[in-house]
């Protein structure tokens, strides 16, 4: 019989791998940022499970929070510039 701990570990690893593939393959960058947030949070959960709470907190706050927010800010700024450029060409 498979132990519940092993099922939990396999689930976390499968979600991490699936979200990493999604980030690499996602066409709209905004969806890739969402996948990156999911990836970062599950890596933080894995660090917490392995007994590294400081590293888990760092992963969750810096990567899932700050980096993803900066990516979304960059997307909103660049989309506004693209819309302005399209209006100027018309």
Image: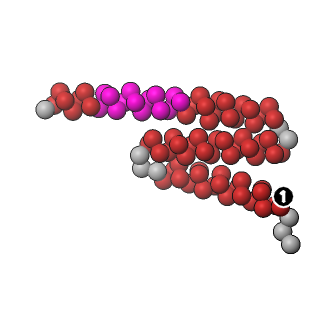
Q: Position of residue 44 (x, y in %)?
A: 72, 40
82 left or right of 43 in image: left
Magenta stretch: residue 3 in it?
no
Q: Position of residue 30 (x, y in %)?
A: 45, 41
Instruction: Specify how the rendered protein is coloured.
Output: secondary structure
Q: Which residue is under mark 1?
A: 5
Q: Which stretch did the figure color magenta?
A: 69-82
Residue 52 position by quadrant: top right
Task: Give the x, y percent position of residue 51.
Answer: 85, 41
Q: Residue at x 65, y 54 (%)?
A: 15
| Quadrant of image for the C terminus | top left
- At x 63%, y 34%, the residue is 63
Image quadrant containing the N terminus? bottom right
Q: Residues within 10 Å of mark 1 (few under 14, many from 20)?
A: few
Q: Quadrant of residue 78?
A: top left
Horizontal and vertical percent for residue 11?
Answer: 71, 58
In the rendered structure, the answer to whether residue 28 lies left or right of residue 14 reads left
């Amino acid at each position: 019989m498979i132990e519940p701990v092993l099922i939990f570990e396999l689930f976390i690893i499968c979600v991490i791998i699936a979200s990493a593939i999604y980030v690499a393959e996602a066409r709209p960058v905004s969806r890739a940022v969402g996948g990156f947030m999911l990836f970062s949070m599950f890596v933080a959960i894995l660090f917490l499970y392995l007994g590294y709470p400081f590293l888990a907190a760092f992963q969750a706050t810096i990567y899932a929070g700050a980096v993803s927010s900066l990516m979304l800010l960059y997307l909103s700024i660049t989309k506004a510039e693209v819309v302005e450029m399209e209006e100027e060409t018309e």
